[in-house]
Amino acid sequence: MNAPSVSADLGSQLITLMAALMLVLQLLLVVENRVLTGIRLYAIQSLFLAGIAGVVAFFNNAVDVYIVAALTVLGKVVFLPWLLNRQVRRIQIVQEIEPLFNAPTAMLVCGGLTLLGYIVARPFTGLERLGNNTLAIAITLVLTGFFLMFNRRKALTQVLALLTVENGVMLAAIALTTYGMPLVVEFGIFFDVLVAVMILGILVYRIRESFASMDTSKLNQLKG
Amino acid sequence: MPVDAILSAAPLKFALLCYVAGAFAGLVFFRFERAATLLSFGCAALASLCGLAVCAAALAGGMAAANPSFDLLPSLVPWMQFTVRLDPLGAFFGLVVSLLGLAISVYSLGYARGFYGRKNVGVLGAFFNALLLATTLVFLSGNAFFFLIAWEIMALTAYCLVSFEHEKDEARNAGVLFFVMSHLGTGCLILGFLLLFQASGGYGFDGFHALGDAMSPGKRDAAFLLFLVGFGVKAGIVPLHIWLPSAHPVAPSNVSAFMSGVMIKAGIYGLARAFFDFLGPPPGWWGVTVLSLGVISAVLGVLYALMEHDLKRLLAYHSIENIGIILMGLGAALMFLHSGHPVLAALALIAGLYHTINHAVFKALLFLGAGAVLHATHTRNMEEMGGLAKRMRWTALFFLVGAVAISALPPLNGFVSEWLTYQALLQGFGTTASLVRIMFPISGAMLALTGALAAACFVKAFGITFLAQPRGEHAAQAQEAPFTMLLGQGILTAACVFLGLFPTVFLKLLDPLTQQLTGEKLSGQLTAANGLALSNGALSGGTVSMLGIAFAGLALLAAPLVLRGLFAARAKTRLAPTWDCGQPGLTPRMEYTATGFSKPIRMIFKALFRPRREMQREYDFSPYFATTLRFESHVEEVFQTRIYRPLVRQVLRVSRRLRALQAGSIQAYLIYIFLTLLALLIFAL
């Protein structure tokens, strides 16, 4: 590594810290019942992601990663939470209904998934340039995000879970490569997510209109 | 790129573009039926004429230089190049598709009129062009991905054309059956190509060449079986043939001609490509398997054909028979390669490929003839035809030529390739000391049986359809087909005669091909008497001169005329009906029926056909004076009832159980995905 070792250590520690905080926020999200709080948790998690990108950019003097960081702040910390907030107010939901697993069980499952994430990531730790265990946390975010997606029934929470999965993917990209993925790919993912959320937002609204509920488990009424 | 490569690439690109233009023209002008017909089929004819010139020139030029190849489109994904490559094997099949494409396109100019005001002719033209384009690309692609894409487009456009008259239940069902079987085959092909990829590290056909040595025997045999099934479905090898007799008849006749003439040959192309080009020196059992399948297909195909009285179904079953004969050639070639006789292998391969183009030509001719008959009588049931020879003179003549050719009677082309097949099989007995050699005389005997039965079948097909008195109202009012339809048939008739009379000229074109696949050139050895006669390649010195036979035949035909000219002046001439034995008043009800004609065969092969008949007679006072009589006769289709129905039942039963998985709940689906992900992660540890 070319950068002075002190600052690289500092960067490493910063990244590890912020990644750990992302994981904590994810776990909070798993047990959080109020949708609005959930959105806020997601916004903070995205802020930490942007922070990690910023640190990576700073220590590698990579301009395009700054752009990624800026886009993350704009999109995931400001715009998407605002969009979701508006959606929540429009369809007036406050609380999640009963999840598939209750909070303690969900915590246990997520603990197991975290363990799995760490085990899976172990062979790759040598590939990480900055920070320890960032990849493990990224995999854990993907897995728990997935878990969150099927644990909840409200379409909005599922959208939120999808977004955290995407955060995990982004984190993995930043952890594994110095400069993150090529900018074009990041743009691609970013706009994919944006479009997906917009479409899902509309769908959520439609589901609500047609079924007078946002419970996706009622969708099986569509089956012939 | 060498100069001749550029020279052959430009016309080839032009031909491919013409097909595309034809497809679009059909779609754009679909409201103007005449314009759509003229433009789309005109483009197809132009494109195939161009392709014909390119392929024939390439084969005649010997193709000694590197195979000309170019990328049709820029590559989008690594490994996937749209390489068009003109190698000898591809050029030969390109020749077949272009020749048939030309004749059928010309024919279609007239044939499409039958759909005016009833169906969308523009769509027919568009799909037809797409089918021709895809089939050409199948033969010319030099990359497994590109090949599979072309293969799929070919299957899908063929599906659309089979169900073109989708208002008929029959067409829809046949379409679905074709679709399912075709994809079963494609699945096998994908697996086969993946095995090849594993061994070569790429998807280019150049890299696949002679891969057999680089693969473990187990994988090589697996690839052999996968390709055999995958391409066998398309070729219509028994027992994978069931889609063929239902799909070919319901398609519009020009499409049937193309499917039977060329599309099933794509299967043969794939088999030849995979076995001779890719999988390297073959183990002994491959040849035995292919030869046995060929024998079974040939015999069963012709037997089922004999039982048909639907003219187009009859022809479709004959396609199975002829695919069997082609496979006999390929199988024998594999066996010779195994036992180290490349010259004989080349001979057997030539026999198979010669029969490929022959069958393409005469089967397309027969289907076009059947189309003309259908056009005129609006029925496919032979029992309602008859007497058409007087009303449709040219069609009858062309159909007769096709029938003689497919029955392997000299001097037409069917005889040449079957003669070569016999020669290869008969010489095979001495090539090996193992018990396997008994296969050769048995196959030869079976080929003889097939030829005899085919002749019987076409006596029936021609006799019942064209001779005697009309059995139905439509047949009585039939009119000759329009000029373009006759011209299309005429082109193929000329090809039949040419391939029959001048085999030595055509054999020269096959030289680069046998050189590529077996390392031997045979046209010199097979030519005797300065190109006037065909020799069997030296072993026992048998020769046959097609021109000689033709002249002898003509002389025999001319003799009565000459004699009559000499003596008729003195004889008295009396005109009378031919077959009424002096008792006037023959009616169509006294004629032989198609069912009646084939009864002896049905009885001989009772064990196979399991004929079932029901008769109900109602009478008032004496059984000798019946008031009504109802007669039904069925032949069991063994493969459907014994293999496919039980198989389908099992699949359905399993599917019903699996249906519980499809709960319709998003959460359940998410859990499936999640569990799969977890399983894969843990598996990767």
Image (spheres, grey):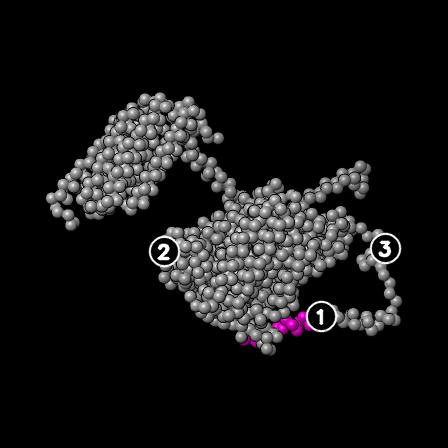
Q: Are marks 2 and 1 on the same chain?
A: yes
Q: CA distance from mark 3 to mark 1?
A: 34 Å
Q: Which residues make up the magenta segment?
A: B537-552
Residue bearing mark 2? B198
Q: CA distance from mark 2 to mark 3?
A: 77 Å
Give whichever of A137, B641 is nearer the camera.
A137
On screen, residue B368 versus residue A50, left or right, reads right
The answer to whether residue B615 is magenta is no
Kindly give the residue lying farthest to the bottom in the view shown: B529
Q: Residue at x 33, y 28 (%)?
A: A84
The answer to whether residue B543 is magenta is yes
Which of the marked residues, 3 or 1, is nearer the chain's N terminus? Answer: 1
Residue bearing mark 3? B583
The chain holding disc 1 is: B
Q: Are marks 2 and 3 on the same chain?
A: yes
Instruction: Determine whether label 2 and label 3 are within 8 Å by CB.
Output: no
Residue B276: x and y in percent read 46, 63
